[in-house]
Image (cartoon, rainbow, N blue to C red):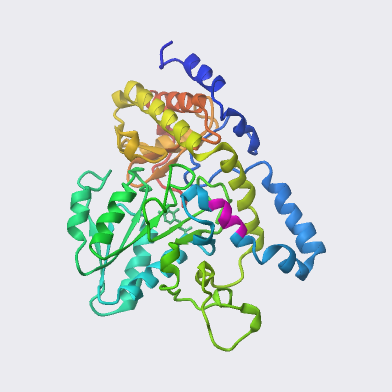
C-alpha cells in the first residue's frame, strides 16, 4: 500500500498501540487537527475532575488544613513523577515558578559558583526569553560579564565544533535548549555536557521542547542543571508551573538568588535568618499556586502510562511520515524544510517555510477554509511549525493536515486573509 494515500494512514492508526490515548483527552471538535501541542498541550479529560476536587474538597472543605494533608509536599510528589521522564532522581527535581524565573535562579547560582569566570555561552537560535534572562543577568552581575551567542549557518542547527570554540577558560555557564523551539534541532546532550565540563563550565539545559517529546536522560549525561515548562508536551495547562533540576552533588554548593521561606531549611520555625534547605527545596521561593500545580499530575500520569520509549518511537514514525508527505506534496509548492531531516537530531515538531506562511496558517485555522480546521503555529518570519504530540496525534492527523496545506496553497485560498498579524501567533 502506498504511503501516499489515506488508506495507509487509516491502517497505521488501527495498528497503533498508543491510539487509545487520544480518547483520554478532552475533544471539543473531533474533526479539528491539533498540531500545536509543542506550544500548549491538550487538556487531559481527567484534569477537570481533579481540579474540581482540589477546589471543592481540598480548598472548600479542608481549608487551611489541606496544607498539611495535601498541599505542602505536592511539588515534591509531582517532581517524583516527572523525574523519570527526564532521567533524574526524584530528589533532584522540583516544581516551581516559571521557566524564565527558574533559568534566572539556576544561571545566577552557576555564575556565583564559577566566580572567576565571566562568560555565558548560548546560541542565536535559543528561545528569546532565555536570551533576555541571560542578558539581564550578565548586566546585573556587572563589569566584565557577557553573553556570547554561537551563530547558526543555516538557521536550523548549531555546529558542535563551532560551539566548542566558544567555550574556554572564561566560560562560567553554557545555557542551551536541548531541542530548539523553531527548528526542533536537538543537541547531543551527553557530548555537549562533556565538552563544557572538561573546560570547567557548568551546563544548563532548557528542556521545554524536549520533556515528554524525546528521551531525556539527565543522569546518564551527568547534566549539571536543567529547567523546563510543563504546558507543552507535558499537558499541564496554560502557564502551568515549571520545573528545575540540580544534580544531587551540586545542590549543597549552589544557592538561589531568591531567599524565600519555601527555600528555608524550616519555613515554619519563622526564624529571622535565612538558612537554605539542604536539598533541592532550597531552589523554591514562595507559596505555589496550588490549583495550577494540581493540574500537572493527571497529565504526567498519562505520559507515564504510555511510556516514553513508545512515545518517542511514535513521534519519530509520525514525523518521518510527515516528511515523506512534505517531499511529495509540499516541496513542489515552494515549501522549504526548516528542521533537520535526520530524526536522530530532531525533536517532535517539523518546521516548514513558505513566503505566504502567515496567511496559510490563518487559512488553516479558519473554519470555513478547506474541509477542516488545522491548528499549527506560525513563527516569524515565514515558518509554520507542525507539532507532533504522540499521545494524541494520529497518522490521519498528519495526512489530513498535509492535504489541507496543499489545497490551501495550490488553490491560493489564503489570499482572502490579511497580512497583518494577530497578537499571539
Ligand atoms: C516555552 C519555552 C519557555 C517558556 O518560558 P515561560 O517562562 O514559561 O514563559 C522557555 N524556554 C523555552 C526554550 C521554551 O520553549
Number of numbered tags placed on the structure image: 0
Query: Magenta span has 334?
Result: no
Tell me if 81 is positioned left or right of 102 in this view. Answer: right
**Where's residue 346, x and y in %?**
35, 39
Query: Magenta span has 81?
Result: yes
Q: Residue furthest front?
A: 249
Tell me if 154 is positioned left or right of 43 in this view. Answer: left
Which quarter of the figure has residue 241?
Answer: bottom right
User: Is residue 279 shown above or below 302?
Assistant: below
Relative depth, front residue between 381 and 155: 155
Per the rendered image, the range of residues in magenta is 77-82
Which quarter of the figure has residue 239?
Answer: bottom right
Relative depth, front residue between 286 and 410: 286
Relative depth, front residue between 24 and 249: 249
**Where's residue 416, x and y in %?**
43, 34
Q: Residue furthest right?
A: 61
User: Is residue 274 shown above or below 366?
Assistant: below
Q: Residue at x 36, y 23 (%)?
A: 324
Which quarter of the figure has residue 134?
Answer: bottom left
Q: Residue at x 52, y 53 (%)?
A: 83
**Where's residue 42, x and y in %?**
57, 42
Residue 375 in view of the camera:
no
User: Is residue 2 shown above or below 272?
Assistant: above
Amino acid at each position: 500500500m502506498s504511503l501516499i494515500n489515506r488508506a495507509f494512514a487509516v491502517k497505521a492508526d488501527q495498528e497503533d498501540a498508543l491510539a487509545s490515548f487520544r480518547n483520554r483527552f478532552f475533544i471539543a471538535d473531533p474533526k479539528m487537527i491539533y498540531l500545536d501541542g509543542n506550544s500548549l498541550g491538550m487538556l487531559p479529560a481527567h484534569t477537570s475532575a481533579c481540579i474540581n476536587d482540589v477546589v471543592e474538597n481540598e480548598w472548600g472543605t479542608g481549608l487551611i488544613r489541606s496544607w498539611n494533608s495535601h498541599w505542602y509536599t505536592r511539588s515534591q510528589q509531582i517532581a517524583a513523577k516527572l523525574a523519570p521522564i527526564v532521567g533524574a532522581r526524584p530528589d533532584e527535581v522540583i516544581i516551581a515558578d516559571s521557566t524564565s524565573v527558574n533559568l534566572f535562579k539556576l544561571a545566577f547560582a552557576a555564575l556565583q559558583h564559577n566566580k572567576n569566570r565571566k562568560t555565558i555561552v548560548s546560541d542565536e537560535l535559543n528561545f528569546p526569553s532565555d536570551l533576555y534572562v541571560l542578558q539581564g543577568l550578565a548586566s546585573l552581575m556587572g563589569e566584565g560579564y557577557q553573553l556570547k551567542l554561537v551563530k547558526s549557518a543555516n538557521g536550523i542547527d548549531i555546529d558542535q565544533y563551532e560551539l566548542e570554540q566558544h567555550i574556554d577558560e572564561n566560560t562560567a555557564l553554557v545555557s542551551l535548549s536541548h531541542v530548539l523551539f523553531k527548528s526542533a534541532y536537538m543537541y547531543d546532550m551527553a557530548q555537549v555536557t562533556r565538552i563544557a565540563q572538561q573546560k570547567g563550565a557548568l551546563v544548563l539545559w532548557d528542556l521545554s521542547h524536549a520533556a515528554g517529546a524525546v528521551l531525556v536522560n539527565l543522569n546518564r549525561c551527568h547534566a549539571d542543571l536543567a529547567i523546563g515548562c510543563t504546558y507543552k508536551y507535558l499537558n499541564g495547562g496554560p502557564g502551568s508551573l515549571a520545573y528545575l533540576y540540580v544534580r544531587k552533588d551540586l545542590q549543597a554548593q549552589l544557592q538561589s538568588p531568591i531567599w524565600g521561606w519555601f527555600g528555608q531549611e524550616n519555613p515554619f520555625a519563622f526564624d529571622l535568618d535565612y538558612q537554605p534547605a539542604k536539598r533541592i527545596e532550597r531552589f523554591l521561593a514562595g507559596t505555589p499556586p496550588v490549583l495550577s500545580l494540581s493540574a500537572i499530575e493527571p497529565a504526567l500520569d498519562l505520559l507515564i502510562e504510555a511510556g516514553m520509549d513508545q512515545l518517542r518511537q511514535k513521534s519519530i514514525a509520525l514525523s518521518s511520515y510527515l516528511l515523506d508527505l512534505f517531499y511529495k506534496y509540499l516541496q513542489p509548492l515552494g515549501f522549504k524544510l526548516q528542521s533537520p531531516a535526520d530524526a536522530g537530531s530532531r525533536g517532535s515538531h517539523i518546521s516548514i517555510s513558505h513566503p505566504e506562511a502567515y496567511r496559510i496558517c490563518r487559512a488553516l485555522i479558519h473554519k470555513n477554509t478547506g474541509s477542516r480546521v488545522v491548528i499549527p503555529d506560525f513563527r516569524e518570519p515565514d515558518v509554520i511549525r507542525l507539532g507532533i504530540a504522540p499521545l494524541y496525534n494520529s497518522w490521519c492527523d498528519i495526512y489530513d493536515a498535509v492535504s489541507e496545506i496543499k489545497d490551501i496553497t495550490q488553490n491560493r485560498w489564503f489570499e482572502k486573509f490579511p497580512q497583518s498579524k494577530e497578537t499571539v501567533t
